[in-house]
Structure formats: C-alpha cells, structure tokens
Image (cartoon, rainbow, N blue to C red):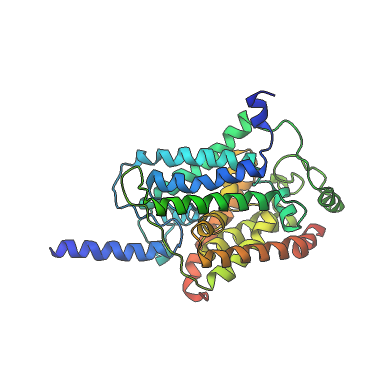
Amino acid sequence: MSANTFKTVDLNTDFEIRSQNSICVNRSALDKPIWSNLKFAFAGILFGIILVKSQAISWFRIQEMFRLQSFHMYGLIGSAVAVGIISVFIIKKFKIRSIDGEPIYFEPKKFNKGQIYGGLLFGFGWALTGACPGPLFALIGSGATVIIVTLFSAIVGTWVYGFFRNKLPH
Amino acid sequence: MNFIEWIKQPWPWYVAGPLIGLTIPVLLILGNKSFGVSASLRHICAACAPLNVPFFKYDWKKEVWNLFFVGGILLGGVITAFFLSNPNPVVIDPKLATELAGYGVTNTEGLVPKDLFNWGNLLSIKGIILMVGGGFLVGFGTRYAGGCTSGHAIMGLSNLQLPSLIATCCFMIGGFFFANIVLPLILKL
C-alpha cells in the first residue's frame, strides 16, 4: 500500500517536471517496448521529406517571410494550422482514441512571461539560422553538414537555459 | 510529367501545409503524442549531461519517442537528398537576391546560402554569429518559450491555446526585427 502511494506521488512529481516543457508531455501511461517507437521514426521520415520539399527549411524562404517578400511560408503555416484545428476538433468531437485504445489527451498550455522573452530570442535565432529545431535535423540530413554545429549549439543553449532557469523571469 | 518528376519539384504551400497539419492527428493517434520538436533538445541534455540541473532530472526514456521522431526527420532529409531532390535552382525573390548580392552572398542554390554556412566560415566572426550564436538562440529561446514553431505555432494554435498565439507573435516580432535590422549589420561585417 505504502509503496503504491509513493509510486503515485513520484509519477505526479515527474509529470510536473515534464509538463514545464509545455509541449511533448507524453500522457500515455502504457509501458511499451522501445521498438514500438519505430512508428514515430517513420512519421518523422515523412515529416522530414515534407519539410525539405516544402522548402520550409530554406534560409532564403525564411528571409523572404520576415521581409514580406513571399506568401509561401504564411500559406504553409496557415494551411497547416487550419488542418490542425479541424483535426483536433474532430478528435475531440468524436472522442477518437489512439491505436492503443487510450483516450487522446490535450495538455492546456499555461501562460508565463517566458513565452514572450523566449519567443523573441527564438525569433532572433530563427532569422539568423533560417531554421527552427525541426529543420535543423532535416538540413543535416539533406547534406548541409555544417548545421551539425548549429544543432550542437542549440543543445548547449537549451542546457544553459535549464541551468539558469530559476534566475530567469517567468 | 510522371509522378517522380512531379514529386521532385518544390511542393506548393497548399500541398505541403496541409500535410504538415496532418502530422498532428497522426502523432496523436499513433500514441497520444503532442507534435513538437524542440523538446528533443531537452531530452538530449537530460540523456547526455543532466549534471544535477533539476530541469534535466526526469526520466527522458519516457519521451524517447521524440528522439525517434527527430531521427526520422534527419533520415527524411537524407532520403530527399538522394531520391527526391529538385534538379532546378530555387527561385528567390529578386529584391532579396539583390540585397544579398550586396553582401557578397551570390550563391542561392541549395537550402542554405553556401557563402555563409560552410565549414571554412566557422571561424570567421560572421560564421560564429550566424551558425553558433544563431543556434544558441534557437535552443535557449525555444526552451524558454516552452516550444518552437511545431509545438506552439502549429500544435498550440491548432488546439486554440492563447499562450501559443502569444509565443508565435513573439517569434515573428523577433524574426522581423533581426532579419531586417540586425542581420544586415552582421552581413556587412
């Protein structure tokens, strides 16, 4: 009994820490073997191909977007969000379950000032590198090997944020 | 034009955008996962160098799906480069081409400007600011904001989250400011 209680508390604390992320909080309580993740690798492959072929990973397209010289990126993100809104609506409306039979859970995001300060800082980096995190991986794959340095630097940036997290305004 | 030739062309936004949007229900239905990429950087920190930082002390193995996903993105880049790459040069806006040529950036082939992003440039001031400094801001900023273009602008907005709208607006404000005001100063170096 006491062991059970401890486990619940431990899981909740763990979830609290993970939810600071505000994204990628994995609500699935299922314990699945590691190879079951291969389906996500497959989804990643398709997403990577779409990123390259849509030119969303092109430094030039990002510069055009921030200079209002092209509609391409606005159309791309806008139509992605439109399809996303409809998909989320359908999933909620018909209570669609995952292929494992779990109810699909949406984590509401809480506002904090980090979304402003961090958002601006990421915007600066996006304009310089022409890439957000997804495209960094796709660019390396597509042969721009020097972006490995940029990805490593982004990992260091994430680490430095984690280190100074308590001292930053949120 | 056969299918392979057609698919090698750059995809228009009205084809690629909805496909990106479909990634959301695919991940949710495959395993209750919220679409997002930048958290993978945090999981890499947690896996490789938690070093007693509380932010990295969690069971990253529970989030390993995200590392499979970004590994797939990288592989998708490889597959596209080998089998689906566009044989024609990318058309860029003439105003942008003129502006870049003013900074000596004339090679507009490929996805990144090879005049700026190359191994040889890594030790120049320009190269360090763009590749190292830019990468740092991407990693620091996305985690501070709690998400990136995928987690906030696409997943968050699709779920009608106000914090994600605020974050997305800040991404754009920051990008507009740096691309128009700061980047020209850096390229002049």
The quadrant in which the N terminus of chain B is found is top right
Q: Position of residue B138 (x, y in %)?
A: 60, 58
Q: Quadrant of residue B157?
A: bottom right
Q: Nearer the viewer, residue B2 or B10?
A: B2
Query: Is A68 above or below relative to B97?
Result: below
Say whether residue B37 is visible.
no
Q: Is residue B18 left or right of residue B123?
A: left
Q: Quadrant of residue B51?
A: bottom left
Return the residue found at the far top: B2
Q: Nearer the viewer, residue A124 or A160?
A: A124
Instruction: Please give the name of the residue rendered at 82% of the width and 59% of the height, measured from the top-left corner.
Output: B188
Please count the marks in the image. 0
Q: Position of residue A142 (x, y in %)?
A: 62, 38
Q: Position of residue B148 (x, y in %)?
A: 55, 58
Instruction: Please give the name of the residue rendered at 70% of the width and 43% of the height, measured from the top-left corner.
Output: B111
Instruction: Please give the name of the residue rendered at 56% of the width and 49% of the height, measured from the top-left corner.
Output: A134
Q: Is residue B173 left or right of residue B144?
A: right
